[in-house]
Amino acid sequence: MVLIVQKYGGTSVGTVERIEAVAEKVVAVRKQGHDVVVVVSAMSGETNRLIKLAKDIDDSPDPRELDAIMSTGEQVTIGLLCIALIKRGCPARSYTGAQVAILTDSAFNKARILEINDLPMRRDLNEGKVIVVAGFQGVDKAGNITTLGRGGSDTTAVALAAALKADECQIYTDVDGVYTTDPRVEPKARRLDKISFEEMLEMASLGSKVLQIRSVEFASKYNVPLRVLSSFEEGTGTLIAPEDETMEQALISGIAFSRDEAKLTVLGVPDKPGIAYKILEPISEANVEVDMIIQNIGGDGKSTDFTFTVHRNDFKKALLILQDTAQVLGAKEVRGDESIAKISLVGVGMRSHAGIASKMFGALAQEGINLLMISTSEIKISVVVDEKYLELGVRVLHNAFELDKNN
Ligand code: ADP
Ligand code: ASP
Ligand code: MG
């Protein structure tokens, strides 16, 4: 018996008509004799609407209560899809995260899955039922509702596929696969037939929202065959799988970008051992993640400038902390910039090639795009630019590296 886990994102379940279309697709898979577990997101726009309601009352809502609110979006969709399935004579049963139970830690708004009880689902599958699970949510040991971070339904689907040892995990969305970059920014972007876990992990962590990064981590760790497909057109989509010889060994597999960035600089701090620690320790104490870091040597040899980036949501919090630290350290000035973006070139082929960075910088320079920060690793090069250059930068690089061609 083949077991398939399918996940339908917000746009795919955005209206009652679309939910009925999903039901048709599920019924068709059942008719082929396969077992199906379906994970659904909230109807499109719903999670944002729920967050806004909470923020209309308090700008930083209590995290436990925010999870209680946000998790309701998916609960509506599971019920609607089950009704549509039952109407079609297909036995179905909905489960919230807690009903499964998808046990998570207690980090509200960004909880991690610890364990999944697969027994009730197996019982239902044995009785010929389709199981419809609410994505994005779980329950902690104390019984609190938790959510898994934005885009978390992808992770629910992969985690269920791992727990149930499914034959494939299919992520149905509003694009027909993973592209060389977001096709909404570069219409010439090319769909990839296959991409390695490693490259997808890098793309997701650098901002490609087509898959939540934790879903790729899970799939890689438990070797879950993962496929991204369109819910609106037929096709084979993109397979995300371990790296192998048959994979296109492209130099660059894609361009990821992120608008969720902000930059903080402290000028004129004394150039002494322990300075980086003193600046960053209070930031990490406050649970703010730091991404890129640059420390310059000041002209006078006694003082230095220190710059780092954080998620834009954490900008205000980080700025307040840094202003305090600057005072304690006797620094000259603190500066912040919330209108920056990060563009990254990703490719395992980079490992064995020199000259990619200079080609990248050259292409951006030709368009007059100033690089505010640079960071590199074995398989990626990231640059921070002014947000207004984001789209242009992505297209310039896509063109410079000829990503529209199968190279
Ligand atoms: P869902 O609601 O189905 O989870 P998302 O909006 O989270 O859908 O993810 C799909 C979107 O990801 C696409 O509409 C596309 O704009 C965006 N995207 C970003 N980078 C890529 C990429 N490299 N390939 C395909 N889509 C991408
Ligand atoms: N509904 C949640 C969100 O909008 C989870 C998801 O769609 O994956 O982030
Ligand atoms: Mg998503």
Image: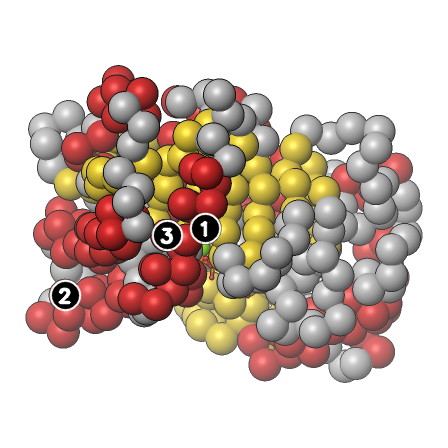
Labels 2, 3: front one: 3
Which mark is in front, 2 or 1?
1
Q: Residue at x 34, y 60 (%)?
A: 19
Residue at 86% over, 67% down: 400
Residue 100 at x, y = what percent? 22, 30
Label 3 beta carbon within 8 A of ligand 1 = no
Amino acid under label 3?
Ala
Q: In this figure, which residue is indicated by the disc labeled 3?
A: 23
**Is residue 132 toward the left or the right of residue 221 in the image?**
left
In this picture, residue 29 sits left or right of residue 92: right
Q: Nearer the viewer, residue 380 or 47?
A: 47
> Which residue is the site of mark 1?
25
Q: Mark 2–mark 3 contact, CB under 8 Å? A: no
Kindly check if marks 3 and 1 are in contact, taking CB atoms under 8 A apart as contact. yes
Ligand 3 position by quadrant: bottom left
Whether residue 313 is visible here, answered yes or no, is no
Bin the neighbour count of mark 1 within 10 Å (Cα to Cα): few under 14, some 14-19, many 20 and up: few
**Quick one: label 3, few (<14), some, or many (20+) residues within 10 Å?**
many
Q: What residue does disc 2 label?
A: 54
Residue 245 x %, y %:
84, 29
Residue contact at pointers 2 and 1, CB within 8 angstroms: no
Find the distance from the CA under tag 2 to the CA under tag 1: 35 Å
In the picture shown, does residue 336 fall above or below 223?
A: below
How is colour applied across the structure in the image?
Answer: secondary structure
* Residue type of the residue flagged with mark 2: Ala
